[in-house]
Image: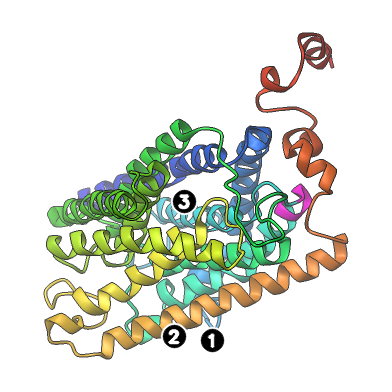
């Protein structure tokens, strides 16, 4: 066992820890972006569904992505992974397994943005299992597991398509079937802002995600050899900063206020966009990618609302639109020196070939994730006689109606009620 094997294994394990920590960022982001009466539910279901997804990934997800004897859709080995070493890897397979498990968990958490404040807890449970079997592993196999898009040279270094677009399209399917939250849209078509209960939580969530993204992107090098992970981390940070700046400035120009939620979404959009290209583009291109992502997320969020789509966590804009842009950007900016997968981009003499491959990947993966997620949720809706809690339960809040206790009991219960509640 050589020194490089050990160092690579430690690096991948650190990356896995950072990506798992991003679940904490999503708890803060989603809870802060929604109302106080649902905060405990959001925190609890995130932990539960990540645990459930971990078991499903161990049983079948890892094998579907990276298994041998693959067919058109998935691999067919390495099920119920027992910790054994796979051949040809210069790092611990167990560490690699945990790293990939963390990515699967993030895709699922993104999908749940479209469920926020109105879905039954039982729907989260069933969808977690089915998404983790039939949606995420299939797309991941196509691009990362040696599938047909990998054979075409599809570039997606750390998951703008595999993780973010896949999660966003599942989120879109959910929010269409669940329909808008009570009070979001008026009968005349006008829009009400259902403000989240804590911008501080939301900002802290973005910062935790930004921090974790170094594991997401730089960790995807899977190696410390030559220190290339530092370059990937640099591009990641530049794109995030550019996205935050451009989103705040465009909001300032267009609405006359430097809108904080827009700025936070801009930082995330920059991170999502650079995720596909962080190892394939130069630093100036990373800044451009982030700047464009920040502008796109501003306009996209408003366009989605005009379509009467209620997306409480802006998953479609932050992870979907920015994920598409980030995936396409490699077809523009990938350099001959850095494009270790596929071909150089359009601006580097590669023509439209790589851009076409990237567009094909976006179209097929996005359509597959949406169609299968929609079908899963439609079947769940018929079996459970609805995806959504009752109107009364939604008004009370999912903390109490689904779990029997508030995340903020002091804000909702009298002192006598708090005493009775604590004695139960």
Residue denoted by label 1: 72
Residue denoted by label 3: 98
299 above or below 249?
Answer: below
Where is residue 6 drawn, in percent x and y? 28, 47
Q: Residues within 10 Å of mark 2 (few under 14, many from 20)?
A: some
Disc number at residue 234?
none
- Callout 1 touching callout 2 (CB < 8 Å): yes
- Callout 1 touching callout 3 (CB < 8 Å): no
* Secondary structure at numbered mark 3: helix
User: Which numbered mark, 3 or 2, is in the foreground of this view?
Assistant: 2
Say whether residue 62 is left or right of residue 233: right
**Viewport quadrant of the C terminus:** top right
Residue 8 appears in view: yes
Q: How far is the residue under mark 1 from the one under mark 2? A: 7 Å
Q: Residue at x 78, y 58 (%)?
A: 387
Residue 76 appears in view: no
Q: Residues within 10 Å of mark 1 (few under 14, many from 20)?
A: few
Magenta span: predominant SS is helix
Colouring method of the image? rainbow
Where is residue 244 drawn, in percent x and y? 29, 49
Where is residue 316 drawn, in percent x and y? 50, 63
Q: How far is the residue under mark 3 from the one under mark 2? A: 24 Å
First-in-chain label (1 vs 3): 1
Residue denoted by label 2: 148
What range of the chain is rendered magenta? 120-124
Asked if residue 325 lies in the magenta stretch, the reply is no
* Secondary structure at numbered mark 1: loop
Q: Residue at x 22, y 51 (%)?
A: 233
């Amino acid at each position: 066992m050589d020194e490089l094997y050990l160092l690579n294994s430690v690096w991948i394990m650190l990356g896995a820890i950072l990506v798992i920590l991003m679940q904490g960022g999503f708890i803060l982001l989603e809870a802060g972006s929604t109302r106080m009466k649902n905060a405990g539910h959001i925190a609890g279901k995130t932990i539960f569904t990540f645990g459930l997804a971990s078991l499903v990934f161990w049983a079948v997800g890892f094998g579907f992505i990276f298994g041998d004897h693959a067919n058109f859709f998935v691999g067919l080995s390495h099920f119920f992974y027992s910790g054994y070493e796979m051949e040809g890897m210069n790092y611990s397979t167990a560490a690699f397994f945990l790293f990939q498990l963390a990515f699967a968990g993030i895709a699922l958490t993104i999908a749940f943005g479209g469920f926020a404040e109105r879905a039954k807890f039982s729907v989260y449970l069933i969808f977690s299992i089915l998404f983790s079997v039939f949606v995420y592993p299939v797309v991941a196999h196509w691009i990362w597991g040696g599938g047909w898009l990998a054979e075409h040279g599809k570039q997606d270094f750390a998951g703008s398509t595999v993780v973010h677009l896949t999660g966003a399209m599942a989120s879109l399917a959910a929010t269409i079937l669940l329909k808008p939250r009570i009070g979001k849209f008026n009968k005349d078509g006008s829009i009400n802002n259902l403000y989240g209960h804590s911008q501080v939580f939301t900002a802290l969530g973005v910062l935790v995600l930004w921090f974790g993204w170094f594991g997401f992107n730089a960790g995807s090098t899977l190696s410390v050899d030559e220190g290339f992970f530092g370059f990937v981390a640099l591009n990641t940070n530049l794109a995030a900063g550019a996205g935050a700046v451009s989103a705040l400035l465009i909001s300032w120009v267009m609405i006359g206020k430097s809108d904080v939620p827009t700025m936070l979404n801009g930082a995330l959009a920059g991170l999502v966009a650079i995720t596909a290209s962080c190892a394939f583009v130069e630093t100036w291109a990373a800044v451009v990618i982030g700047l464009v992502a920040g502008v796109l997320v501003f306009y996209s969020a408003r366009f989605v609302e005009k379509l009467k789509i209620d997306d409480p966590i802006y998953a479609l804009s932050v992870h979907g639109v920015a994920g598409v842009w980030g995936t396409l950007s490699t077809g523009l900016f990938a350099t001959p020196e850095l494009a270790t997968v596929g071909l150089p981009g359009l601006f580097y003499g590669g023509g439209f070939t790589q851009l076409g491959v990237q567009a094909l990947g976006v179209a097929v993966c996005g359509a597959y994730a949406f169609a299968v997620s929609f079908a899963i949720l439609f079947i769940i809706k018929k079996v459970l006689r609805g995806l959504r809690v009752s109107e009364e339960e939604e008004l009370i809040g999912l903390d109490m109606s689904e779990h029997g206790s508030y995340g903020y009991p002091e804000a909702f219960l009298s002192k006598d009620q708090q005493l009775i509640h604590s004695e139960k």
